[in-house]
Amino acid sequence: MSHKANAPKINSIAELPPSEAKWIELKKINWTDQAGRERVWEVAARKTRGRSGVDAVAMATIILHPSRPPSTILVLQYRPPVDVTTVEFPAGLIDADESPEAAAVRELREETGYTGRVLDISPTIANDPGMSTANMQLVVVEVRLGEGDEEPEQHLDSGEHIQRVVVPLDELYEKLLTYSRQERTMVSAKLFHWAAGLHFAKKQLLQL
Amino acid sequence: MSHKANAPKINSIAELPPSEAKWIELKKINWTDQAGRERVWEVAARKTRGRSGVDAVAMATIILHPSRPPSTILVLQYRPPVDVTTVEFPAGLIDADESPEAAAVRELREETGYTGRVLDISPTIANDPGMSTANMQLVVVEVRLGEGDEEPEQHLDSGEHIQRVVVPLDELYEKLLTYSRQERTMVSAKLFHWAAGLHFAKKQLLQL
């Protein structure tokens, strides 16, 4: 794949009439609160949720190598909603008849080339529950490499432009701060929270 | 505040016409990708973003007490978008002319009663960048208590029903798994990621 020098760019932003929307929709929820009062809440939702009842998976990948420090893999891609390059865990929507575990292994292979073993899968968790129905599961995937293993090839869909970066876990938090200082680059909140938890624990444990 | 036994409930869900939406909106982004191809991306956005350019803050609060283990504080509240009680870090939208730091201290006091000192504030990070423009900053707030300090009173707005729970950091990850097993309860993805990073670090460091 040849990455051309063309930077992606937004040409225009328009109102999206509900009749045209294919991927997401707005809903008005009429609800009764704890005090018996009728209220309205506005919510955004994905229209693509399948049988699993979960929209997406993201993968906290742990790469183990005989002579390199334990690392994780991040993906960088231009994201039109925020009009910048984001730094995220590999992630993807779960297909209609797919299990979250299968989606995790498939998406990790597509976006990064690596094949791993699912070590742990989170409960269903809410992406942004004040605004959206979107939910996900966080999957911990272990990738064990041999000394001479070469970097595998990505299996991107046509039109996908995703850069992968392997980062030692010990450097992850600082690396995310560095990315955040770059022009037109933003870290995803979920990845940042994971790294901040890791960073906090290490600081706290090293004080003991 | 008396919590009545009434469980909040959804009465109906309807399409939200753009002309009626006050808080969020759908947009159609026309963009040109890396290969020069014109494409469309559908996105949800908050309509309330103020001068800071950031929608919201969430607070990773560290409560230090002379004779109790370091703890954090979580908030539980019914969230109509996901129709369950969510477990989250205290959080809130930043007012139009407010700084993120000021919003953090204000929201923490309103939702939990505690007053703290801002130790750290993250870069602006993207909540769900495949679907939404929403962004936030994660603020680490330290609360130092004395031996005999009593639990402070919340300062909730009328119509807010928020329960606070103090959880020792060492028990946080397990506690979130326990909440996730309860009926009609869901943990927020950002809080879960923070706890999972903390948990992973402790497991990893204890193996050394």
Image (cartoon, coloured by chain):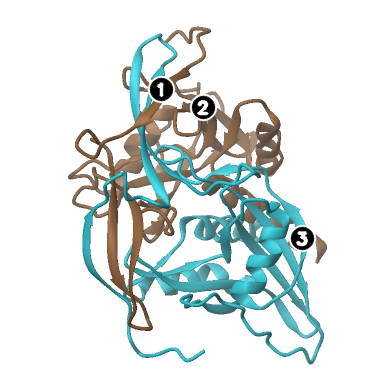
Chain colours: A cyan, B brown
Q: Secondary structure at mark 2?
A: strand
Mark 3 chain: A
| Residue at 37% in and 35% down | A27
Amino acid beneath label 2: Arg
Residues marked 3 and 2 touching at CB (< 8 Å): no
Q: CA distance from mark 3 to mark 1?
A: 42 Å
User: Residue B111 or A153: which is nearer the viewer?
Assistant: A153
Q: Residue furthest front?
A: A19
Return the x and y of residue B24 as percentages of the image width and height: 29, 41
| Residue at 26% in and 47% down | A17
Question: Residue A37 occupies which quadrant of the picture?
Answer: top left
Q: Residues within 10 Å of mark 3 (few under 14, many from 20)?
A: some
Can you say whether B5 is above or below B128 in the image? Answer: above
Mark 1 chain: B
Q: Which mark is drawn over residue B164?
A: 2
| Residue at 53% in and 7% down | B5
Can residue A81 be seen at all in this image of the molecule? no
Can you say whether B79 is above or below A15 in the image? Answer: above
Q: CA distance from mark 2 to mark 1?
A: 9 Å
Can you say whether B16 is above or below A6 in the image? Answer: above
Q: Is residue A144 left or right of residue A11?
A: right
Mark 2 chain: B
According to the image, label 3 marks what residue? A118
User: Residue A171 or B19: which is nearer the viewer?
Assistant: B19
Q: Is residue A51 left or right of residue B111?
A: right
**Labels 3 and 2 within one chain:** no
Q: Residues within 10 Å of mark 2 (few under 14, many from 20)?
A: some
According to the image, label 1 marks what residue? B154
Residues marked 2 and 1 touching at CB (< 8 Å): yes
User: Residue A72 or A83: which is nearer the viewer?
Assistant: A83
Amino acid beneath label 3: Val
Which quadrant does the C terminus of chain A fall into? bottom right
